[in-house]
Image (tube, grey):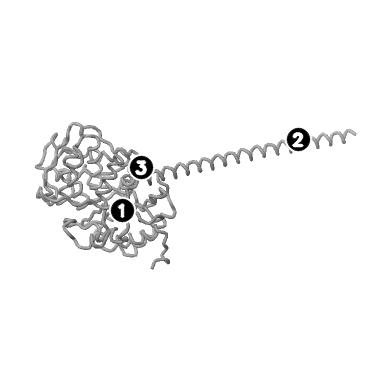
Amino acid sequence: MRNRRSRRNWTKSYQVRIVVLLLAALTILWIIISAISSVVQLINRSTTNFTRQNTELLKQLPTTPLLPPDIPPGSNAIALPTPIDPSLQENELVYNVTTPPDLKPSQQLQGIVDEMVQLIQANRLPTEPLSITLINVKTGETAGYQQKLLKYPASVVKMFWMVNVFDQMQQGILPNEPLYGADLNRMIQQSSNDAASRLVDVATNTDSGYNLRGEKYEKWASKRRKISEFFSKAGYEGIAIHQKTYPINYLRHETPEGRDMQMWNDPQELKNQISSEHAARLMYEIATGKAVSADASAKMMQFLARDLRLSAWRENTARFAGFNPIRGFLGQGLPAEVDFASKAGWTETGRHEVAFVRSREEDGPIYIVAILGADEAYSKDWQLFPNLSRMLFDRMSGKTPEQKQ
């Protein structure tokens, strides 16, 4: 009798333990499901917010067709007006977009960038000095190759100088844009070093000239560096853009002279350097209306715009003033019916470009690409950039190598 009661008690105890374990398991399962549900909701909310934000950004893109301005007539050696209040330039000026855009890495885009690198390798060009950044403006996705590699950008730097000038006009430090419009136009459309030199002078309240000594040189150099600090304090890490580009005809300087040469020879002083990530970011911020202001961004996009019709760029007309930004660059590889804005740079030691590309077809691609090729092999190859651009446009349009006709 006692054994039966003992077995009965043991059975009840066992059943209770089973029930407790089942309840515990169900509780744990409920916690896990709730946690997963919360994560999914968070991801969905984040995706929805990201999509909404990107949709709003797309509304800020320049109107189509995007056409370049006319080149102003007359002399390009007109002295520019000085700052309204030079003392304001002594303040800490910082670019208004202080954090990089929230772009998402994309395996699909990375595959396209990898194909670009493979094409470069197939042409037997070195990839060590190569930097590429690609942004799908429609989706807010990005990919790249050695994106943070800092290289001498040649005239691509002029896009950065333009933004700084517009910022100072916005703040009332420099007079209104029409007084600077002609030189801004020539600096971007013709890549004029003369125009760029004058704009750097007014933007930093400095000028080129004979050597300076001691405190005078340090004060001059400090003012020049502010144009680099304008971006570096806004998250453009490692950027240096405070040295002029040459030759400068009105100064009769084929290379740096005087105080510019002092800065150039200073081992503690950085030469101009940016990354493809820097260039693509700034073009993205201009294209989406974030740089300085929506109105300023729209004006800057027009300065950067290019006409891809063959009749507009086939001949090296006076419009280009010696530098054709289409021939041998990304624009040459694109259809004429594409909105295209760019800033290219070329020297004997490299070929560089950042570009905004938008198909005029309703479902066509919209993207930004920056390529820095800091080697003489890139400088000498006049077909590489057009071929890269043609392939990139096909891939961004959804065409595979098999579909290419």
**Of residues 143 and 51, the one drawn nearer to the viewer in this rendering:** 51
Quarter holding the N terminus is top right
* Left or right side of 260 for 18: right
* Mark positioned earlier in the residue sequence (3 or 2): 2
Position of residue 338 relative to residue 290, above or below, is: below
Asked where in the image residue 84 lies, by quadrant, the reply is: top left
**Of residues 311 and 35, the one drawn nearer to the viewer in this rendering:** 311
**Of residues 295 and 213, the one drawn nearer to the viewer in this rendering:** 295
Residue at coordinates 11% horizontally, 49% vertically from top-left?
A: 75
* Disc marking residue 100: 3
Identify the residue under disc 2. 16
Three-letter code, disc 2: Val
Three-letter code, disc 3: Pro
Q: CA distance from mark 3 to mark 1?
A: 28 Å
Residue 302 image position (x, y, % from top left): 26, 49
Secondary element at tag 3: loop
Identify the residue under disc 1. 65
| In this view, the mark in front (3 or 2) | 3
> Please, which residue is most extreme toward the bottom here?
405
Secondary element at tag 2: helix
Residue 116 image position (x, y, % from top left): 36, 59
Three-letter code, disc 1: Pro
- Category of crowding for the residue at label 1, using alpha-carbon neighbours closer than 10 angstroms: few (below 14), some (14–19), many (at least 20): some
| In this view, the mark in front (2 or 1) | 1
Asked where in the image residue 126 lies, by quadrant, the reply is: bottom left
